[in-house]
């Protein structure tokens, strides 16, 4: 694709309370409806009217901050939308590959090819207290090993049915042709799965594989498996570095640079004019619970910031860099620390920044300026698209769809209609080949005939 | 509720082509629709038009099938319906209680109180798909299952009803004093809690069970609110009904707290002759050889070597112990009917092909209504789990013809009673147990505090 034809891809990170820490208190927000499916449907349909590529749900298995669970929510949304992609976060540390492969295949069929899997290795140590599996929280390196194997098993399960499952010409013959369905007989260090999966290969072959880890091993895992990367970048320079780094790792896995899309998070505060955006930013800051924000920031830096003045610089010399309590997204922390260091941020600036983007870049400006920002990052290879973090729901989403998107379309850098019906088609990603014959051949095994009877 | 006012409840077991073994070959059936959401949404809407209580799907984690996974399927249908309930089968042997508690809670929120859980321990082995050496024996499965259900209930109870406050003025979203750790440390699960989603609208989704073995009946009497069962005769159904209802008292429960719903495959016509024709037509589409070889596993002989009109060779039955890994009670029910009613092989085949172990009843609209009324009034059933022989026609004829007849007789609702599945089934919303549980354990309530 020539540089002039490159278009931006946009994902919406779904959070009914809004992404700004004070957003839920904004008069337009209805946080009390965050268990109400109708509220999610409104947001999904609004995003689809703006030709957004996909919706994304974060997840984990502890705490009290989550609301609807991704598989159930995205399945419900699949029924009331027709083009938008549905990306669910599912951890490889606290699940079974068989269930996950099957639920994603099911979601991909329900949505006719719009499922995406945000693969995480789990970022809350507390998850280990709720899921009996490992009796705790495995170390990061072990989590990546488990995750790598998990994804491999899952792909093999999706590939355990040939495309033509052998119904042949007699579509009334429900007997399944067993020669087209294969046991995978996977025997790894963490998983032993015989297969086959009990649902045919998903419409997209595999759901789109998404990743968010930006650590060294995260980047490597992404280069190997991911087709979309969500990342937190605070400056164009850092984004470009990350972009080049990850794209250059693809070749060694036999992949081309356009087989992976890099989408940094973006918390945009947008108005008709810059002044309007500034007003909104101030309004949101006034809604912040400063005490809580400082407490969070103190936890982040492992320094009690309440003892400092808001306009003091962040006391970086006191920050402990190897604190285990942070546990989770180590790379996200580095990105933020780096920005704090480079920009010499005050505590107030830090709180303001992190309230809107929780680690992702925030941008405040008119819709024209927001479009400029997006265009610059796209053209200068900092991004293939953005993971949007609406600050106030639905207000920020409405502004984006009504103002920013038409501006991007006028500039020829965003679609004017969906390119296809599947998420892969809209993202310009190829449908993966079924690898089962490859795998079997590589192992010098003959393709096994599965003898289990059809169950229905 | 007085006996005269008793009303029937109906669930429909949804499926790709129907419950008759030859359904896929019937000309009215749309083939290749097992992974087409629209096909199931049509079934759901037809059922909702007929004011049916709920939809049900079976499930398993091995073998081959061309169908949706239940939780995802029902979440999608929930977005397009308003009243009908969703009974999803989820096994306790190869799942994790935290995920299952959460997914059901989420489905219950999404459907605004229409979720139900058909709790199974899974007769079919899936050990090979989950890195296990072997499928646990039934006794072990029940022990794991009991603890699993116990953990799930505690997780649902880990939030008080009014924990979420969203007080914009006082900057308070969640009252953390109303969310609790459960600190479960059992033989099989270690779960600290709380769940990361508030208590389901129904308190708990409706709890359903299907096992009819001795252990199954005891577990049902203790925990189930709806029981699916396979009964071939009114006599056997009455025995089962009074046996199970009789067990409730010792668990401090009343007979209305558990609904018994035998499976029923109704082959319906405007007249009896029309119904018989449909039954014959379906029989003629049957792959007799395949079906006979399937049934032959109960016998020491191959049934296909006998003439179709010969009596079932009862003396050649295999001993029941050989079926210990399967649904033994289902087998007993069919064999029992074959013995008592002196079936020919053809009758045996026809009966088994219709409802895979559940009773098939062929008759006019009035006769089907008579059948239902009789079982309802004479203590054989509180309702039925409908297994239409073919989709969508079998469900449509029930909804459009049998339902009005039952309404005329005053034994079926004319409007949904409520908005949740519990309300429609007449089941109370369970109290939050956590205070009781903590008190019983001699512990003080420990709030999970700030998160």
Image (cartoon, rainbow, N blue to C red):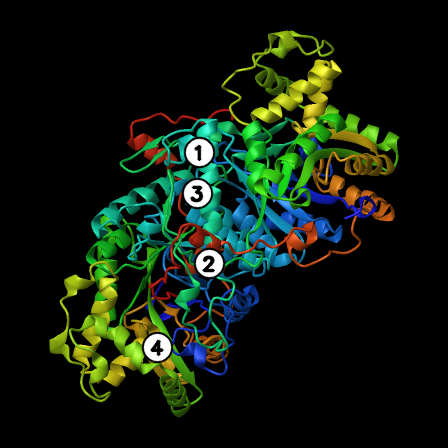
Q: Are marks 4 and 3 in contact (CB under 8 Å)?
A: no
Q: Mark 3 sits on what residue? A: B99
Mark drawn on residue B194: 1
* Alpha carbons under labels 2 and 4: distance apart: 23 Å
Q: Chain of mark 2?
A: B
Q: Nearer the viewer, residue B103 or A450?
A: A450
Q: Mark 4 sits on what residue? A: B354
Dot 3 or dot 2, earlier in sequence: 2
For numbered disc 3, what is the local secondary structure? helix
Q: Nearer the viewer, residue A156 or B374?
A: A156
Q: Nearer the viewer, residue B434 or A68?
A: A68
Q: Chain of mark 4?
A: B
The residue depicted at 40 percent of the width and 43 percent of the height is B431
Instruction: State whether discs 2 and 4 lie on one chain.
Output: yes
Dot in front, 3 or 2: 3
Q: Chain of mark 3?
A: B
The residue depicted at 42 percent of the width and 56 percent of the height is A197
For numbered disc 1, what is the local secondary structure? loop
From this view, report whether residue A132 is shown above or below residue A445: above
Q: Is residue B195 visible?
A: no
* Alpha carbons under labels 2 and 1: distance apart: 25 Å
Name the image quarter holding the N terminus of chain B.
Answer: bottom left
Q: Is residue A278 visible?
A: yes
For numbered disc 2, what is the local secondary structure? strand
Mark drawn on residue B86: 2
């Amino acid at each position: 694709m020539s540089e002039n034809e490159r278009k931006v891809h946009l994902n919406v990170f779904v959070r009914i309370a809004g992404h700004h820490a004070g957003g839920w208190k904004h008069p337009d927000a209805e946080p009390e409806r965050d268990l109400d499916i109708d509220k999610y449907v409104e947001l999904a349909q609004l995003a689809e009217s703006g030709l957004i590529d996909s919706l994304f749900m974060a997840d984990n298995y502890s705490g009290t901050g989550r609301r609807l669970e991704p598989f159930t929510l995205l399945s419900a949304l699949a029924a009331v939308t027709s083009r938008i992609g549905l990306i669910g976060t599912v951890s490889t540390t606290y699940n079974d590959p068989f269930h996950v492969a099957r639920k994603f295949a099911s979601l991909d069929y329900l949505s006719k090819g719009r499922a995406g899997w945000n693969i995480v290795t789990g970022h809350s140590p507390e998850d280990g207290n709720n899921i009996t599996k490992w009796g705790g929280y495995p170390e990061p390196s072990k989590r990546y090993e488990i995750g790598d194997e998990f994804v491999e098993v899952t792909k093999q399960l999706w590939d355990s049915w040939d495309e033509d499952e052998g119904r042949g010409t007699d579509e009334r013959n429900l007997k399944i042709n067993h020669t087209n369905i294969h046991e995978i007989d996977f025997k790894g260090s963490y998983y032993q799965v015989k297969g086959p999966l009990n649902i045919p290969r998903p419409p997209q072959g595999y759901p789109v594989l998404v990743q968010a880890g930006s650590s060294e091993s995260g980047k490597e895992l992404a280069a190997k498996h991911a087709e979309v990367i969500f990342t937190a970048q605070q400056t164009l320079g850092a984004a470009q570095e990350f972009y080049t780094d990850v794209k250059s790792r693809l070749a060694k896995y036999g992949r081309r640079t356009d087989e992976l899309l890099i989408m940094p998070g973006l918390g945009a505060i947008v108005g008709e004019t810059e002044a309007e955006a500034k007003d909104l930013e101030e309004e949101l800051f006034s809604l912040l619970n400063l005490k809580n924000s400082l407490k969070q920031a103190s936890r982040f830096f492992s320094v009690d910031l309440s003892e400092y003045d808001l306009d003091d610089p962040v006391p970086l010399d006191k920050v402990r860099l190897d604190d285990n309590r942070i546990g989770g997204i180590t790379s996200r922390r580095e990105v933020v620390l780096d920005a704090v260091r480079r920009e010499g941020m005050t505590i107030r600036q830090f709180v303001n920044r992190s309230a809107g983007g929780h680690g992702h870049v925030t941008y405040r400006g008119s819709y024209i300026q927001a479009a400029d920002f997006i265009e610059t990052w796209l053209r200068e290879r900092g991004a293939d698209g953005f993971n949007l973090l609406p600050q106030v729901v639905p207000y920020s989403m409405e502004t984006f769809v009504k103002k920013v998107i038409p501006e991007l379309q006028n500039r020829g850098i965003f679609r004017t209609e969906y390119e296809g019906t599947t998420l892969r088609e809209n993202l310009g990603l190829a449908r993966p080949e079924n690898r089962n014959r490859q795998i079997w051949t590589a192992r010098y095994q003959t393709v096994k005939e599965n003898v289990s009877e059809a169950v229905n | 509720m007085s006996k005269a006012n008793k009303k029937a409840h109906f669930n429909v077991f949804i499926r790709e082509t129907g419950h008759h073994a030859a359904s896929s070959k019937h000309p009215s059936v749309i083939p290749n629709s097992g992974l087409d959401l629209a096909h199931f949404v049509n079934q759901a809407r037809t059922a909702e038009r007929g004011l049916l209580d709920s939809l049900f799907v079976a499930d398993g984690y091995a073998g081959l099938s061309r169908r949706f996974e239940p939780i995802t399927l029902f979440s999608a249908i929930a977005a397009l319906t308003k009243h009908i309930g969703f009974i999803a089968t989820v096994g306790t042997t190869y799942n994790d209680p935290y995920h299952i508690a959460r997914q059901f809670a989420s489905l219950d929120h999404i459907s605004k109180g229409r979720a139900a859980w058909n709790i199974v321990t899974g007769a079919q082995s899936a050990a090979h798909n989950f890195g296990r050496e072997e499928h646990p024996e039934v006794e072990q499965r029940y022990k794991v299952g009991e603890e699993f259900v116990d953990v799930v209930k505690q997780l649902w109870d880990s939030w008080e009803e009014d924990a979420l406050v969203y007080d914009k003025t006082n900057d308070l979203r969640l009252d953390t004093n109303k969310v609790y750790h459960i600190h479960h440390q059992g033989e099989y699960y270690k779960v600290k809690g709380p769940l990361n989603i508030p208590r389901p609208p129904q308190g708990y989704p409706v709890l359903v069970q299907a096992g009819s073995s001795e252990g199954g009946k005891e577990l049902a009497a203790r925990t189930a609110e709806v029981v699916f069962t396979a009964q071939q005769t009114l006599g056997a159904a009455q025995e089962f009904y009074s046996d199970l209802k009789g067990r409730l008292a010792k668990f401090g429960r009343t007979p209305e707290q558990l609904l018994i719903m035998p499976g029923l495959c109704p082959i319906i016509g405007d007249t009896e002759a029309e119904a018989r024709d449909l039954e014959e037509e379906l029989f003629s589409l049957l792959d007799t050889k395949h079906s006979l070889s399937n049934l032959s596993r109960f016998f020491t002989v191959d049934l296909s070597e006998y003439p179709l009109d010969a009596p079932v060779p009862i003396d050649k039955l295999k001993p029941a112990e050989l079926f210990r890994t399967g649904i033994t009670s289902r087998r007993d029910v069919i064999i029992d009917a074959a013995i008592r009613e002196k079936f020919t092989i053809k009758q045996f085949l026809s009966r088994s092909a219709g409802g895979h172990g559940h009773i098939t009843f062929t008759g006019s609209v009035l006769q089907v209504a008579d059948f239902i009324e009789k079982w309802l009034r004479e203590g054989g059933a509180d309702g039925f789990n409908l297994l239409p022989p073919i989709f969508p026609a079998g469900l449509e004829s029930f909804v459009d013809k049998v339902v009005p007849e039952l309404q005329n007789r005053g034994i079926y609702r004319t409007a949904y009673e409520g908005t949740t599945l519990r309300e429609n089934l007449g089941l109370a919303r369970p109290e939050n147990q956590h205070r009781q549980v903590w008190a019983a354990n001699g512990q003080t309530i420990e709030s999970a505090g700030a998160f």
